[in-house]
Amino acid sequence: MNRSTLSLIAAAVALAAVTGFAAVTAPGGDSAKADAKGPARLPVERSSLLCPAPSLSDLAETTYTAYTPKGGDAGAKAGAAGSAVLKPAVTPLTDGTPAKSTDKSDKDKKGKKGKTPEKPDPNKAVITLKEPGKPASATADGSDAPALAGSADGPLAPGWAAQQTTVVSAGDSRAVLGTRCTEPDTDFWFPGASTAKTRQDYVHLTNPDDTAAVADIELFGKDGAIKSEVGEGITVPAKSSVPVLLSTLTSAATDDLTVHVTTRSGRVGAVVQASDAKAGADWLAASADPAASQVIPGIPGDATDVRLVVYAKGADDADLKVRLAGASGSFTPAGLDTVHVKSGMTASFDLKNVTRGEAGSLLLAPTSDGGKTPIVAALRVVRGTGDKQETAYIPATAAVGDRSTAADNRAKGSTLAFTAPTAAATVKVTASPGTEGGEPQTKTYTVKAGTTLAVEPPIPSGLKGSYALTVETQPGSGPLYASRTLALPQDGIPMFTVQTLPDDKGTVAVPAAQQDLSVLDD
């Protein structure tokens, strides 16, 4: 065994111990050689994803789509086929489990209400991906569709992505709800949740492991932490998912909350399902990790109401500059030259129809004397007016990095938004084959510094079914941030959902050997 191999194995063991959901092995040949000037980047060989239970509505129609881009299997073992499977995570009957919908129009296709849910088979795969570069999809109808948990290994692991898109066509819960299935973790921030009377927000906690996890849920409003002992020590049984209604954690009706989920033991996937009686519903994904600056990409140009929610973490207040990056440049929205967010508190700001017909991205940064207080942030975005409104949420996100993927796209309705806050960026977009046929297409775009570029992405020629979009920053590009909007209008309602596109973590840095272990060579 040579010294490079020993070094890589040690790094792999350390990585697996820290993350718990990504691992690498030391491949042979030239790919195992680290650059003497820095760490080598190797493909992960195992990754995990979790998808929340889609909906309480019997009218819900859910599509799951999974995809792994080509080109991420350089580190896979020779001849390894790999696997990528999502299976049901059983929802236990606990006090946190939501009741069946009582919406009078919320009936199943046989006209019955309140039917007893069928227990899903945790050993039966809901969706299986067979090869990189070709997406797979599955559908589930009604309120019985379970949360999903699964893992990918070998050549299917690097960049493995899954999307859950649910359409509820009628009733108080009518909406399009979309979310990227997420990796398990131990710490999540959700600015933009609410316990207002018109809202019904659930935190979905999904445990992928063979032992129970214990989680805490903290709430922060405009006056700071909201006391709640009910949110402490929530048990999430092994291989299961638990939804927790936020209004059961506090009697206070609060318009804008920041939810903080941590685990005492184990790890979970966490996401918030936010429902508004007047303006539809969508999933609120976790914000990027707390940082002094944040980027929120892809506000639709026809947004009729935009609300910014920010939480300041740490001992000091945050004073922030707010800039909107549009098609031709960046500017400060009227009345928002600077915003002040008190330490440990949630602040909200009404941006109204800030984009005014032109897609944009929000850039948050400390003022020159505003210090480095870390913040988390998200936007609540409304399209439409009156009784034909629909809501989506856009959290602050990490940069695309090398590559990211939006797994579920249709022949019509997808829009990509790219923003380059500090320097020009070039990005290659690849449309995969369709789930039922079609040929991939590729197009390259340039994004000017300080702007947002919104484009209709390439579509596979001869498309049948849905398809995936992979975005890759090109050499020499500045930092790039991105999101995908999927519009599925119905009956005059501009129903839509937005997913950000952070780096897919398909590779990890493995340090080069720092000492000579050649004496151990075979």
Image (cartoon, rainbow, N blue to C red):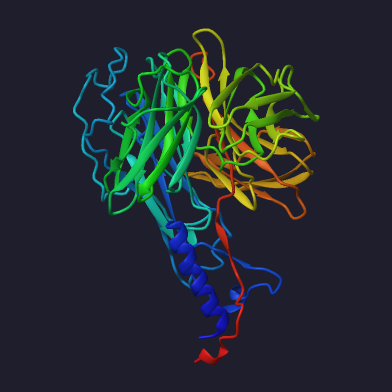
Q: Residue at x 47, y 41 (%)?
A: 188
Q: Is residue 100 above or below residue 40?
A: above
Residue 415 image-quadrant placement? top right
Q: Is residue 345 above or below residue 235?
A: above
Q: Position of residue 325 (x, y in %)?
A: 74, 30
Q: Does any portion of residue 220 appear in the rendered image?
A: yes
The front one of 159 and 316 is 316
Residue most toward the top? Answer: 386
Q: Position of residue 414 (x, y in %)?
A: 59, 32
Residue 312 image-quadrant placement? top right
Residue most toward the front? Answer: 315
Q: Residue at x 65, y 36 (%)?
A: 295
Report the label total.
0
Q: Is residue 248 left or right of residue 15?
A: left
Q: Is residue 408 above or below residue 153?
A: above
The front one of 404 and 284 is 284
The front one of 506 and 34 is 34
Q: Position of residue 9 (x, y in %)?
A: 49, 74
Q: Does any portion of residue 496 appear in the rendered image?
A: no
Q: Position of residue 352 (x, y in %)?
A: 64, 15
Q: Is residue 262 left or right of residue 90?
A: right
Residue most toward the left? Answer: 116
Q: Residue at x 74, y 33 (%)?
A: 367
